[in-house]
Each structure stands twice: as C-alpha cells, then as structure tokens.
C-alpha cells in the first residue's frame, strides 16, 4: 500500500521544528514536537451499555460494563518502515491500562504516525496491540490510510470544516497465527481475505468476506460447524424493498436463510464523516479546568450490510494552548444480524422477521489530563511550552479508542469462524 508524503508537508515540518528550536512562537504550541522527556498522563472512565431485543428462550437483560482508564502518551521522531512509506514522522504512542469493573486489568498500546502538511495535522496510520481477553484472541492491527487523514488544523479557525475518506488497508494478526487483510475503498465498501481455524480444530481454511457499493456481498469460509459455506446477501430489491440471504454448503445443502424487510436504503451510503473546529468552546462536565479552549469535533456514520450493523460515532477534543485538555468519545453500534446464536436458537445468521434491530451497544468515554497540568497550562502565553499532551497526539488518541471499538465488534460477531 502506497502513501504519498506531500513535499509541502515536509517543508512545513522543517519550518515548524526550526521555529520551536529558535524559541519563536509557532502559534499552535509547536504541533510537531520534540520528543517528550517523559510519558504524559491521561485518565478517565468508559461505560458500555448492552441492550438486547430478541432472545431464546428469553431475551437477555440489559447490562453495563464500567472501565477505569489510565493512559500515558509519548512522542518521538521515527523512521517509518513497511507497510508505511519511507520517510520520517512522529510516533505518538498511547499506552493504556483498562481496569474493568474494578477487577480485571488489561494493557493496550497504539502507535500512531502523525505529521504536519501545510496547515493540517495528518495521520498516516497506526499499529494497535490488543491482548487476549476472555474467549477473544490477542490481535495486532496495522492500519495504513490511502490518503493521510486530517485530524486537526493550525491555526484553528472557528467554523473550519473538512472531511476524510475511509480508504485504507487493515492487516490483523491473531494470537493463534492466522491473519486477515481488509482493503477498504473510499466509498466504504471492502474486501477481506485471510484464514480462520477449521471447526474441527485441525488447520486453517481460507476466508473471503466482501461488501460492494450496492450493499450486496458474501461471507465464504468456516462457519457454525461447517468447513466451507457461502452466505450470500442480496442488495435491497422490490417494492417494498426486501433483503434475501442464502447459504450454500460446498458439496452439500443450499437454501434461503431469510427474506426480511430492508433495514437500510437502496443505493446506500456506507461511510460519511464531518469534522469542524469551534473556538471559545465550553468544557463538558468532568474535564480538567482550562480556559480558553477550542473544540475539534469529528462525526461519522458507518454501515456494514454483511455483518449487519450501523455505527454512529463522535469524538470531541478540547485543546488549550496547543495541548489536549480533554477528549469525549461516543459510539453507538446497532446490530441487525446475529451471527453467534446469542439471541435465538433459529437459523444463523438470524435476523428479525420484521428487519428490526436485535441488539445495541453504546460506548461512552471521557479522558482528561491527570493532575493540575491542564489548569496551569491554560494561563501560559500562546505558543509557549506547556507540560501537557501535545495536540498532535489527537490522532493517536482517536486510533486507540477505535481499536477498542474494533475489539468490541470482534467479541460480538466473531465466535463462529472468521466472521467479524
């Protein structure tokens, strides 16, 4: 996968470093930072609310998981290696420990590769290490964006807006050695190939999972005790529109899984995103005190017509004098298909006969600077050095949260074979 380093971005990097080293104000608190002398700290809380609408023999009751979060952030210059393009960037490492319901502590790390390009702070990609938990394997994810994502701007102008496309290559390596490689197009459609363990436990079987721009697609591979099965999903058709899913066991049975009312529109939008800057923003409750602050707001919507979910997410980052004071995340995942047999004993994958949602997960997280550093930094002159999380770390913080949401999806959708 090739990524383009813009010449203008490298010129901006050199100019910014020169301004910082000479003591001249660079206006943004020097977004391209010198290496942090020591890890800088953030802490906060995440809640996940699970709601189920169908179940067998009865519907599972709602539940909530509360997680205490501790993060440290370090920034260092690095020479990028494959699959990233040749060049240098900032390696922003987020090391996180999650303590779930006061009992289980799990460490995570994400390394995000960021830089400046003109007035933009850009993210080239990341590598996230998620340890094994429960029945979920450990995972190493490497994500490389086709076009560097804009995560912030300098200077920050009230009302400034931009968008990003989702085109990327995602490679996942699991604890048992099998891997999957997903290529995501700019319209949000994707194709994933890889391997999953055979239901017999002996060896691995190829997996092919794809979604096209119409919403049609297929999962081919081991599933629910079958060595090789094709699950094919048609795009919405007819009036009123319906979705039909069929199965074909290689060398065996075939038939219809379901025909249900369409739960998404024909010619769907698979991914959309908006980003905006609001100056003079008000900090939400629970954030470290700082004034004035600017808000960087990202919103996105994602539709997966094959796994069968909609996702709506928002990240609100609050910055003061070039440092991240507080970040608030929210993610709502609504499932329309049950691949695991969690909600029903009927045909798998199961869908409500009326095309209604069958489960929902709402994740909320607030991360703020640890200690009094945020309050103290708010009173320094613009462009002055502050002992806080540099604003260039925003992309890394977003990638760390996204990796946790990806792990949630795997736990919900992966039990039977390579599906996730």
Image (spheres, rainbow, N blue to C red):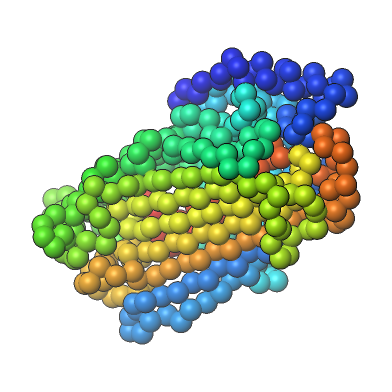
Residue 313: image location, x then y, percent: 50, 55
**Left of 319 or right of it: where is 304?**
left
Look at the image and tell me in which quarter the N terminus lies. Answer: top left
For the residue pair 266 and 397, the one nearer the viewer reads as 266
The vertical placement of 246 against 28, above or below, is below
The vertical placement of 383 against 109, above or below, is above
For the residue pair 10 and 212, the one nearer the viewer reads as 10
Q: In which quarter of the image is residue 261?
A: bottom left
Residue appearing at x 44%, y 37% in the figure: 165
Residue 58: image location, x then y, percent: 36, 84
The vertical placement of 327 against 77, above or below, is below
The vertical placement of 82 against 327, above or below, is above
Q: Quadrant of residue 90?
A: top right
Residue 270: image location, x then y, percent: 34, 47
Residue appearing at x 69%, y 26% in the figure: 78
* Residue 72 visible to the viewer: no
Residue appearing at x 29%, y 70% in the figure: 356
Residue appearing at x 46%, y 82% in the figure: 61
For the residue pair 64 and 82, the one nearer the viewer reads as 64
**Left of 49 or right of it: where is 380?**
right
Residue 19: image location, x then y, percent: 80, 21
């Amino acid at each position: 996968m090739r990524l383009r380093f813009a010449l203008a971005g490298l010129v901006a990097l050199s100019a910014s470093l020169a301004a910082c080293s000479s003591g001249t104000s660079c206006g943004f608190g020097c977004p391209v930072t010198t290496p942090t002398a020591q890890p800088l700290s953030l802490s906060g809380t995440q809640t996940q609310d699970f709601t189920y609408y169908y179940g067998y023999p009865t519907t599972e009751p709602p539940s909530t998981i509360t997680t205490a979060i501790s993060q440290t952030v370090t920034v260092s210059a690095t020479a990028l290696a494959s699959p990233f393009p040749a060049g240098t960037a900032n390696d922003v490492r987020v090391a996180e420990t999650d303590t779930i319901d006061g009992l289980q502590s799990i460490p995570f790390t994400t390394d995000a590769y960021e830089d400046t390009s003109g007035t933009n702070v850009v993210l080239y990609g990341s590598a996230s290490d998620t340890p094994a938990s429960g029945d979920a394997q450990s995972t190493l994810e490497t994500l490389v964006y086709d076009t560097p994502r804009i995560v912030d701007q300098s200077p920050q102008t009230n009302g400034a807006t931009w968008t990003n496309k989702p085109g990327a290559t995602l490679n996942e390596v699991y604890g048992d050695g099998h891997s999957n490689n997903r290529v995501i197009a700019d319209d949000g459609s994707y194709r994933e190939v890889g391997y999953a363990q055979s239901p017999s436990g002996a060896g691995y079987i190829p997996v092919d999972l794809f979604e096209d721009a119409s919403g049609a697609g297929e999962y081919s591979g081991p599933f629910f005790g079958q060595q090789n099965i094709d699950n094919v999903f048609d795009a919405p058709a007819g009036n009123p529109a319906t979705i039909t899913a069929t199965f074909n066991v290689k060398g065996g049975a075939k038939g219809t899984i379901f025909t249900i009312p369409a739960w998404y529109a024909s010619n769907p939008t698979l991914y959309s995103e908006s980003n905006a800057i609001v100056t003079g923003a008000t900090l939400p409750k629970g954030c470290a005190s700082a004034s004035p602050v600017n808000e960087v707001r990202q919103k996105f919507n994602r539709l997966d017509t094959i796994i069968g979910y909609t996702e709506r997410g928002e990240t609100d980052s609050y910055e003061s004098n070039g440092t991240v004071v507080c970040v608030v995340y929210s993610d709502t995942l609504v499932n329309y298909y049950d691949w695991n047999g969690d909600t029903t004993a009927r045909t798998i994958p199961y869908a409500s006969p009326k095309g209604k949602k069958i489960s929902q997960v709402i994740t909320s997280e607030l991360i703020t600077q640890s200690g009094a550093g945020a309050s103290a930094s708010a009173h320094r002159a613009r462009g002055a050095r502050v002992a806080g999380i540099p604003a260039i770390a925003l992309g890394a913080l977003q990638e760390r949260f996204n990796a946790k949401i990806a792990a949630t999806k795997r736990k919900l959708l992966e039990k039977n074979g390579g599906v996730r």
